[in-house]
Amino acid sequence: MHPAPSVIIFSTISGLGFGLMLFLGLGLPDVSGWVAATFATLALGLATIGLLASTFHLGKPKNAIYAFSQWKTSWLSREGILAVLTLVVFFIYAALWAFMDNRIAMLGYLAAALAMGTVFTTSMIYAQLKTVPRWNTAVTPLLFLLYASAGGALLSNQMTVALVLLGLIIAFQAMAWFQGDTAFARSGSSIETATGLGNLGKVRLLEKPHSGKNYLLQEMVYVVGRKHAAKLRVLSLVLVALLPALLILLTEVNHVVAIVILLSHIVGLFAQRWLFFAQAEHVVGLYYDAR
Amino acid sequence: MTQLPTSTQKKLGLVIDLDTCVGCHACVISCKGWNTNEYGAPLSDMDAYGGDPSGTFLNRVHTFEAKAEGCASQTVHFPKSCLHCEDAPCVPVCPTGASYKREEDGIVLVNEDKCMGCGLCAWACPYGARELDQMAGVMKKCTLCVDRIYNENLPEEDRIPSCVRTCPSGARHFGDFADPDSHVSKLVAERGGMDLMPEQGTKPVNKYLPPRPKADVNGTQAPALEAQSEEITGFLGWLDRTLEKI
């Protein structure tokens, strides 16, 4: 699948924002006044920037208003509704907390739950797709939730919780890659089932329908840069989880170290999300003898 | 709405005969022509006269080769367009309600006034039947020529999809699969019409007729011809014999 920068920025940055909302909603860190306002602004800013970035890949953004209508069947519609709801509830909660010094715990829990709900709906947009076997697994939503909450823990300086979450990320990300590498073969789709010609023998594409590129190939048969995938996997896991975990364990986390941890985590997160798209193979590639 | 109808009154669709298709791409061109001039936004081309042309098509013809061990290979031309699936995965994923499947005839359509061009329906389709028009920014797909099949301004013989009307080898058939006595239902029954990627669970309405078994692919090549053994007579015969002696 094509790793569109707008979608990578959207899912990583908004994930960090909603992850931070999870901890602020739970009343962590225990701050008030301007410090609370700064944390809340950061959370709202990240979530909003991410959501705005997602509109850049739309062909006709002016019709985006209709996207709130199909919550009965569409995960993307559910995501849109939950995202807006989360922003509104969290804004009210944070404003009362920071400016009236009145932190309403129940409202905070609601905001936290909504924030995780939003991340879950985002992940289900990918996990629901039978056409992309690598994504079509329960590990996809689990990882999205882990990445968002780990980022939120780092941003809100909850280093012990972060340590646990980073450990879980290493375990489940490794599992996702291990399972993912055989997911396409296990899905049962092949060029023979795609063409129905399997009873005639081994099938191969003799001639493409056209000599040029097309939307399907650009969007769903993305193969650029896959040769560095193995290196990128190691690099992303080191940056996103291993290095931050070691720094938390072995050093006194002051402001400078905290910034190094955050930068390392975010760069690793970009690499992870790039791989999430670039390594995902769509079954339509079978019609082009390409994955 | 993006909820699929539990059943449709008709199941309109195509039968594509892989035995008869000659791979001429006439259906591709007639589809492009009709759908550029009529229903919805035109099917745009990008850099049409430049070095890197591309464009939106609702129907494309691939060519595959199938070869079993020890047999000669077979070439199969393979037209591919929307299969108007009964369990169309492209419809429920649509966030705006632009994608829908019609209760009356089962045709899967896009309401371009609501489509925001997010592309999720194209991701959900295993067959590559949907393409985002790069100029209009909306999703395009086969409409089964909904603006022809019910169009009383057209002569009756033209009230079929453009690709079917155009096909010079009679490889494309249009009809109602809900009616067991229809032309297409009978073809499917007689020739073993098949689904593409049945494991995806989409229940395609369109069916493909497999190539008929060939007589000469059973592992043996025809025996080589014997060397010319007939006696040559006349002037050429004399010349042949004389030259032989020299």
Image: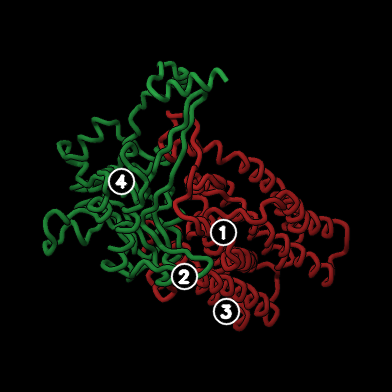
Chain B display color? green
Specify few, some or many for label 3: CA neighbours under 10 Å numbering under 14, 14-19, or 20 or more. Answer: some
The first of marks 2 and 4 along the sequence is 2
Marks 1 and 3 in Cβ contact (< 8 Å): no
Q: Is residue A18 something one can see in this rendering? A: no
Marks 1 and 2 in Cβ contact (< 8 Å): no
Report the Cα–Cα distance between label 1 and label 3: 42 Å
Identify the image quadrant of residue B97. bottom left
Residue A255: % across, % down: 82, 72
Q: Secondary structure at mark 2?
A: loop
Quadrant holding the C terminus of chain B: top right
**Is residue A23 rendered to the left or right of residue B117?**
right
Residue bearing the label numbered 4? B86
Q: Secondary structure at mark 4?
A: loop
Q: Which mark is residue B49?
A: 2
Residue bearing the label numbered 3? A96
Residue nearer the viewer, A211 or B5: A211
Mark nearer the viewer, 2 or 3: 2
Report the Cα–Cα distance between label 1 and label 2: 26 Å
Q: Chain of mark 3?
A: A
Amino acid type assigned to the residue bearing label 2 in the image: Tyr
Q: Secondary structure at mark 3?
A: helix
Residue nearer the viewer, A99 or A208: A208
Chain A display color? red
Amino acid type assigned to the residue bearing label 1 in the image: His
**Is residue A169 rendered to the left or right of residue B167?**
right
Residue B10: % across, % down: 19, 47
The first of marks 1 and 3 along the sequence is 1
